[in-house]
Image: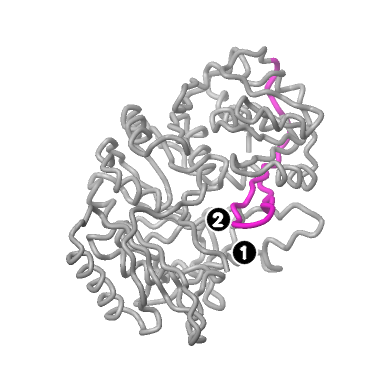
Amino acid sequence: MPSLWDSLSGSRGQIPGALLAPDRSVALSSLLAASALSVAPASLAGACVLVATRSQLSAALALIELDGIARRLVIATPDVSREHLRSVIDTAGADTIVVDEGRASEADLLPRCVRALAGTESPVGDRHGTLQSEWVLLTSGTTGAPKLVLHDLDSLGGALPRRASGEAPLVWSTFYDIRRYGGMQIFLRAILGGAPLVLSSPDEPVREFLARAGAAGVTHISGTPSHWRRALMSGAGSMIAPRYVRLSGEIADQAILDALRAAYPQAVVAHAFASTEAGVAFDVTDGRAGFPAAMVGAAGAGAALRVEDGTLRIKSARTASRYLGAAADALAGPDGFVDTGDMVELRDGRYYFVGRRGGVINVGGLKVHPEEVEAVINADPRVRMSLVRARRNPITGAVVVADVVLNGSADDPAALEALKRELVDACRGALAAHKVPTLLRIVPGLELTPAGKLVRPVG
């Protein structure tokens, strides 16, 4: 696959598209005249480059300029600690670091440092690269040093759809950071399709982000279900009018799919299954949670799906090559299938995600997937989102409890108590007795990880 730069500039020597950040925007055509790096990109030929900027915009420009020139691009997430950056450097064999103002203190981690500039102002030099650069993404594990997952541009973007001839112009946006797998997919869709991309920022209120996206005329936008629940809670969802709404990264239950359909009746609402290791397996656009059972074992599909021991397993050309590190685990089995660790359950010809294998609550020897309880609670139109977790119990070891965020305010104590009883009754009607919350709290909000997923208790 051609490098990003060659893909962009291959048409009549022009570069379409732009990156729109909260503080500034860069038309990609400006890269024809000047670089966003403090050195000519060609001077980094064959290097193993750690891109460790604070700004998404700086990281995006560095990736565009260095793909095909650097031997390996190691893409650090903004929240990775200095300690873990040292581990990343050692494991990846990085010899050069790219930093910006927000991360200037990390410049001393490697002897060779390149600055990402505030704009495109450095001499450009030759950017034509002949290498198939390796792209290394970091997993978003909850504890310890992140795993390093080895991709290349072909496994990340080779199968992405391109804008069809005659199709109306696209403007992409995402709640994700583009340095995580979900955001990287949107970044590459925009760049390879020559479309503008509205970048988000963790410091930017949801309302301001949606206002910027709306002002840019966003047509396609993605995020986790938790991102979307927050967006709908903000009251600013009407600031955008997308044609395509995408969810990934968490289970998309029927409640959030229905809420997005109601908010954006003109849009295709799709939920995708993807992981950093397995790549994108499939999109579902029929408006229903889960996916058709016929997709498992289907011949000629873009990704081969298999369910084994209740977990979804995937094999495709978009699967990463391997984990980096001498003691790293095997990424896939001998047959090439990646065990995603995501549990599925077959009901009426459709597979439904029920939770992560490692996230099960053990209630007296009986298993509870928090997500299946949340799906029942979230189905109530008065509920925006919920988090189900374990609480220690001297008899059963654990019981199920739930924190619930409501769609609107409810100040009447009697009404709140009645609502809680109704939610528990709904769980009793839909779930086995050991899965019913013994305690349900109404809370103002729930914490999200930097990847936009609900923060779930560990252990």
Residue 376 position within the rendered picture, expressed as x and y whole percent measured from the top left: 32, 70
* Residue at screen point 69% across, 50% down: 148
* Residue at screen point 54% across, 46% down: 159
Please state if 275 lies on the left or on the right of 232 as rendered: right
Residue 369 position within the rendered picture, expressed as x and y whole percent measured from the top left: 45, 73
Q: In the structure shown, which secondary structural element does the residue marked by tag 1 occupy?
A: strand
Please state if 376 lies on the left or on the right of 131 as rendered: left
Q: Mark 2 points at which residue?
A: 275
Q: Mainly helix, strand or loop, the magenta region?
A: loop
Q: Hey, what amino acid is under mark 2?
A: Ser
Residue 275 position within the rendered picture, expressed as x and y whole percent measured from the top left: 55, 55
Q: In which quarter of the image is the C terminus?
A: bottom right
Mark 1 or 2 closer to N-term? 2
Mark 2 Cα-neighbour bin, 10 Å: few <14, some 14–19, many ≥20:
some
Q: Mark 1 points at which residue?
A: 338
Residue 81 picture quarter: top right
* Residue at screen point 31% across, 63% down: 378
Determine if the magenta segment contains residue 148.
yes
In this view, 16 is above or below 239: above
Residue 278 picture quarter: bottom right
Residue 422 position within the rendered picture, expressed as x and y whole percent measured from the top left: 22, 72
Please state if 131 lies on the left or on the right of 459 as rendered: right
Range of the magenta residues? 125-151
Q: Does residue 318 appear anywhere in the picture?
A: no
Q: Quadrant of the N terminus?
A: top right
Whether label 1 touches label 2, CB < 8 Å: yes
